[in-house]
Amino acid sequence: MRSETSGSHRSRSTKAACAALAIAAVAGAFTIASASGSASGDGWEAVAVLLDADGNKVGKVKFEGDARGTVVKATVNDVIVGRDGYHGFHIHANPDSAQCIAPFTNVGSHWSRPAEPPAQPAVHGSHSGDMPSILVLADGSGEARSVTGRFDPSEIAGRAVILHAGPDNFGNIPTRYTTGVPPVGGPDATTQGTGDAGGRIACGIVTLD
């Protein structure tokens, strides 16, 4: 009986040791996975404070890197009070690392990684810096949250976030819509460049947090 009891005890001890080793292995794998995530932007954080043409703070955009890419969290206030609607929202190239100067044309066009030959330059909707529009309420406030795999926060430091006056069509102009004589279908150069989102009403420079 003593022998059997001792054997049972050893069996339980062996099982407990194996369980501890399994937990340690899982924990080690998680640590390695977390560390490897930093290569794809995990852990990076950046922020852009949005200012209107008069220099008033009207919003903030936070970029948080994770294993998927970047989580974008935007909050705006006092933007075109009295009229609700969508507003285009993009990262602009800001080629000279300039500050936001109204009417914010100094920060250049939409940012996108250079195209690899023989690929064509990206058109709107496919720029690296294209993001979903923000729906602003009648009181001028709005929030938006999205996830993009097109960049991580470290890539956009020093670039500009622009909030536009109008909605963004993302270049989605079906060929059944035609203009001109003879008719020309599909998106024109303005649509392919900006999505016809209109003027630039707020700007913020991205800084690493």
Image: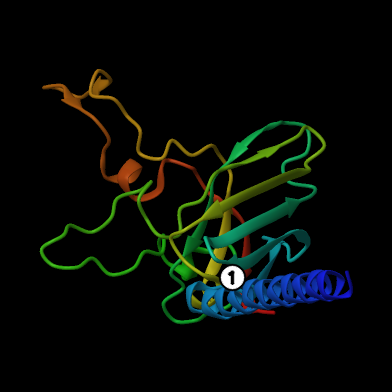
Q: Is residue 35 above or below residue 69?
A: below
The residue that label 1 is drawn on is: 101
Residue 5 screen position, x and y as percent: 86, 70
Secondary element at image label 1: loop
Question: Quarter of the image holding residue 21?
Answer: bottom right
The answer to whether 38 appears left or right of 83 in the picture is left
Question: In the image shown, does 113 or 8 lie closer to the viewer?
Answer: 8
Which image quarter holds the C terminus?
bottom right
Residue 65 in which image quadrant = bottom right
Compared across the picture, whether 185 is left or right of 76 comes to: left
Task: Tell me which residue sits at (74%, 52%) in the image.
Answer: 75
Relative to residue 113, is residue 52 drawn left or right?
A: right
- Taking the view exactly as shown, the residue that stands out farthest to the front is 1
Quadrant in the picture for residue 12? bottom right
Q: Is residue 132 above or below residue 160?
A: above
In percent of the image, x 89 and y 74: which residue is there? 2
